[in-house]
Every structure is written in structure tokens, then in C-alpha cells.
Image (tube, rainbow, N blue to C red):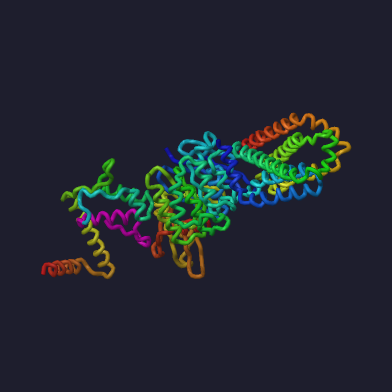
Amino acid sequence: MELLEVKGLTKRYKDFLLDDISFSIPPGFIMGYIGKNGAGKTTTLSAITHLIKADAGEICLEGMTFRKDPVTYREKIGYVGDASYFPADLTRNDIRIILRNFYRSFDEKKFDDYMEKWELPKNLKIKKYSRGMKVKLMFASALSRDTRILILDEATNGLDPMVRREILELLQEYIEDGKRSVLFSTHILEDLQNIADYIYFIDSGKKVLFDTKDELLETYLLVKGGTEELTPVIEKNLTGIVKNGYGFEALYDTGKGDFLPTGFSVEKPTIDEIMVHMLQ
Amino acid sequence: MRILKYTLIDFLKVKKKLGIFLLLVPACALFMGAESGAMNTMAVMYCLFAGIIIAGMPYYYEKSEEMGFFFLLPGRTEEQILGHFLFGSLSLLAGLGLGIFCSCVSSLFHTEHDTGNTLLKSISGNEPGMSELILLLFGAGLICVAVQDFFCTLFRFESVQVMNIMRILPGFIFFFGLSMLLNYGAKTPAEILKFLFSHSIEAFLSCLAAFLLTAFLSSMIAKARE
Amino acid sequence: MKIIIRSQSELPIYAQIMEQIRSQILKGEITEGTVLPSIRKLAKETGVSVITTTRAYSELEAAGFITSVPGKGSIVLPQDNALLREQYLKQIEEYLTEAIRTAELIKLDRSELSDMLEALWESKED
């Protein structure tokens, strides 16, 4: 059974439509959810965590919908966003009390260990926390519980590389038992480059692609050459051509293209480069 | 019960501010009461007013950025709303307790000078009728909190302005309305008040019923919307 | 066991892992019967995705280097001579093909290449 199944998720706003999004994540894997700002990433994740109500579609977490059992559904999700979602006047102890009262699987010792490890001050109001501290508090609240899925919405924005690295290691540790998964939306694509198993690319509320990361990186090649060398035939075989004063850069789909003319520089693209060129 | 846990959250949100209230309100109550000579009633009213304001304070924190954690908690919407209402009523109760306490304190100082309250005198004859008044005030307080919470529930995602108004308006109507009533109401409303006075328990119970009804209505509405 | 992943490399990461484990087995640096780290543990330690390590291991299994035992993990198989020999032969073939290609680039002909091979073999025996 898939850990998370999203079928036909649709949400209408005044000038935006999240249109028929479907995907699934098996247990024990990391899925990167990518797209530019405003593409619909937060809307999708908010619908999955049920912070907003979808207009259509079905979302199943371990075979269970929110409607059927909202309490258990919420217990299973650990969510970290890019901004603090705590009431600003509370302290970490207040959060601890609330967590203890609401979540059956809350492990106080684990929470305290994280507080100590990350040196989060005891009696300081959350509004006085730095950005990094707020994110760490969100992670601590999510990780000191027994969850089935970690949903991260741009959670590593604005964090320094060391902290980001620490978090990526935590994510890999999280899925190590093969039973839990991570859904990670970000536009810091280097974070996903190595550890993501699946990539879902969304743009303007619609799916652009959904594949394993390995497959994606093997399917596309980054082709570079001089602009004079671009004949119409060659152009037809390339996607997302970007020209500058000294040459061009484009994606070549090894599955679709008829041929790759020799003489061009060819290299493996990063997920970043794939995204940029596909959005051209 | 999960409702109580939501009430606990409201308490955690406002506890930092309570310190000021606990000092200021009784002080004002005692001071202002001394001025008007209707010490007892003023004290209770002030404290109830404070209770109404405190009841509305958790809604101040219902800005979307700070609400994520709250909405992600495993609990039902109805429980959230009822938790708010419970907090409101407990806050009123605390205000009432404090008011009665202040009343008792003030009565120590005013046994001779108590010119009493014209309204009270005209309604209840010679008996001060404090307990009936308190009951009615508490009932009025419940109605205010009910109105406040109802509108805040309805508008909590739509309009921050409505919520801000609603957190302040009922309290002020309560306070100034009743102040005026106590000072000038001896004429026309006397009949109504006389009636209410003699049926203070029933009046209180209907206020309580209205409060509970509003609470359940709000929780149903919030759930239906979700 | 040593695994080093180079993101600049031409090879996809699963192939790098596979290749490195394979060569260490062939060199005897990883002995038969050794239990390799689990797919997930390897993924976590090297910082790559689970699908990648899964693929590396399944390719190694298909080539007969390892086998997966339920409950234990992936175990290095005894490398019987035929398989080992075949792998080595394959490797030699790859190197020779590369040498021929390079020779063509500088227009070295067949007999000249042969002579080079002879000379090298002779000097090695000294």
C-alpha cells in the first residue's frame, strides 16, 4: 500500500487553479516537489495537511482519509513550513505542554534532547527566535512524535548550509526504517539532487513531470554549443534553448530526440538545470 | 477531554498578559467604585468587563501565520470552538470571583458612607439585592462573550477587522451600557429591571442557555465549513 | 568497504557505486560472505537516494556478485573461477578496445599496436 495517495486534487482560487494533481509515494522514500514560486506547491501541501479544503480529489494517508478520522490523520503527519507557525507569544515550554496534551506519541525526552542539541532557549518567546531557531523548533516538534510522513514546505529556506546538511541527514534517517516517507517541496534543488527518490515538477497548477530522480537525470542531457551551430533541425530536437552572447544551452531528451549531433558539449544536467530549461 | 486542552491553549496564549490585569483591574474597580459610591456593583462590573476582554484575547492570535500549529493539532473543529467558548466562560467566572472578592473588600470600607445605588434601591426596596444583580450581570456577560465568540468564529478566516471589532465591542457595550443604566436607569427601564430582578435566576439560566446554544451553533458552523 | 561518489563523473551514481563495489570484490578487498550494508543504510551513509542504491545492488546481484538473503541482507557470493574470469576478460576487452580507439586517433596501425603490446609484456617480465 502506498503511504500517500493523491488523486485528482483540485483547488480553485480567484486567479489560480490547482488542476487535477495526482501522485503517490510508497513508504520509505523521499519525494521532491518542485516548481517556481506560485506554481502551486504550498496549495498542494496545504491540501494534504488539510490546512485548506480541496475542491475536488481524494487524499489517502496509509489508506485513510482526513474525513474518516481527522485526529489520527493529523497524528501521522509531521509538518514543517518555511515560516514559524507557532503563536508568537508562546515559549518552547508552552509548545511542549501543548504537544504533550495533544499527541499520543509525543516523546518528551526526545523533544528535550533536540532542544539541548540545538540550544533553543528555554523561556524566550518564539517571536524573538531567529529564523533558524524557528525552523529547528518546528522540526523538533515533528520529529519527537511518531509520524508516518514528514511534509516540508520550503523548510530549508534561509538556513545556512551546515544546518541544511544536518536536516538532510535527519530526513534520510527518518526514512531508514522503510516505513515512513518525506514529501519535500523546495526550490533549493541541490538539497534534492542526491537524496530524492522521486521528483514531481509542477507549474501553474499543473503537472509538468513525475518520475524517479535517477530516471530524470538519465533521460535528459545538457547540450551546449555555439549559436551558429543551431540549425532548425537541431533546434527541433532540443528543449528550453537559452542563448547568451557566446553560445546556447538546452536540454536534450534522450528518449524523444532522433539524434544528437556530435560536436556539442554534452553533460549531465542538475535538477536545477532541468527545471530552468523546461520552464523556458 | 480535548475541549479542555484547547481551553488550555487559550490560557497559555494569554497568561503573559494576565499579570497586568490582575493588578490593574481590581485597583481600578476599587478606585472607581469609591468615586461613584456604588462600590459593590462597580467592582463586579469592572471585573466582569475584564473577564469579557480576556475572553476575546485568544482571538488576537488567530492570524494565519501563527495558526498553523494550532490547526494541525489532532482535534476536531467543534472541539476547538467549544474550547474557546469554555475559556470565555471560565474567564467570566474568574472575573466574577474577583469582582465578588473586591466587593467584599470594598464593603469593609464603606459601611457608613454607602449611599448605595439609586437604581438598586428603587428596584429592590431596601434590600441591596446584590446576588440578583450579580447573577444578571454574569448572564449579560455570558451573552457578550457568546456574541463575541460567535462572530469571531464566523469571521476568523474572512476578516481580521470584524474580529478586532468584535473583541472589543461587546465588552464596551456591556460596560458603558450598564454603567449608564446604573446611573440613570431609575426611570423607564425600572419596570424591566424590576421584572428581571424578581426573575433573576430564570434570566440567568436563559442567558446560560443562549450561551451554550451559541457555542454549539458556532462549532457546527465551523465544522460545516471545514 | 570504500565508496566515493563523484557528482562530476560521467557515470550515473548507481553505476559508480556498482563499479566500486565490483572492483573491490574482484580485488579481494571485500571477501566472500561479507554482509554488505543494507540498501537504506548505504543510502543514508553516502547521502544518495534509496532508489539509487537499490539499483546498484540489483545490478550487482544480476551480475552474480551478491545475493540477498531475507533477514540478513546482501551477501557477497563466492567468486567461482568462471565468473571471475569472465569479468576479468570483459575488463581486458574494454581496455584493449580503448587502446585500439586511441591508436586510431593518432593513426597507429595494427602491427604497430601489436608491437607495443609485445614490448610492454616483455618489459613486465623483467
Q: Quadrant of the N terminus of chain C?
A: bottom left
Side of A113 relative to B77 (left or right): left
Residue B152 visible to an observer of this rendering? no
Residue ranking furthest to the right: B187
Residue nearest the observer in this picture, B148 or A33 = B148
Q: Is residue A147 left or right of residue A53?
A: left
The residue that appears at 37% across and 62% down in the rendered structure is C8
Q: Quadrant of residue C124?
A: bottom left
The front one of B131 and A233 is: B131
Q: Is residue B122 visible?
A: yes
* Residue B16 x/y as whole percent: 61, 51
User: Is A27 drawn above or below residue A112 in the view shown?
Assistant: above
Q: Establish if C106 lies above or below A210.
A: below
Q: Position of residue B29 (x, y in %)?
A: 74, 47
Give residue C32's position: percent from left, percent from top.
Answer: 20, 50
Nearer the observer, A49 or A243? A49
- A198 on left or right of A154: left
- Magenta residue span: C1-28
Q: Is residue A44 left or right of residue A114?
A: right
Is residue C120 in the magenta section?
no
Instruction: List x then y, in percent, for residue A198.
Output: 43, 49
Q: Residue placed farthest to the left in the image?
A: C126
Q: Which residue occupies the foreground of this view, A88 or C99?
A: A88
Which residue shows up at 54% across the image and 50% down it? A41
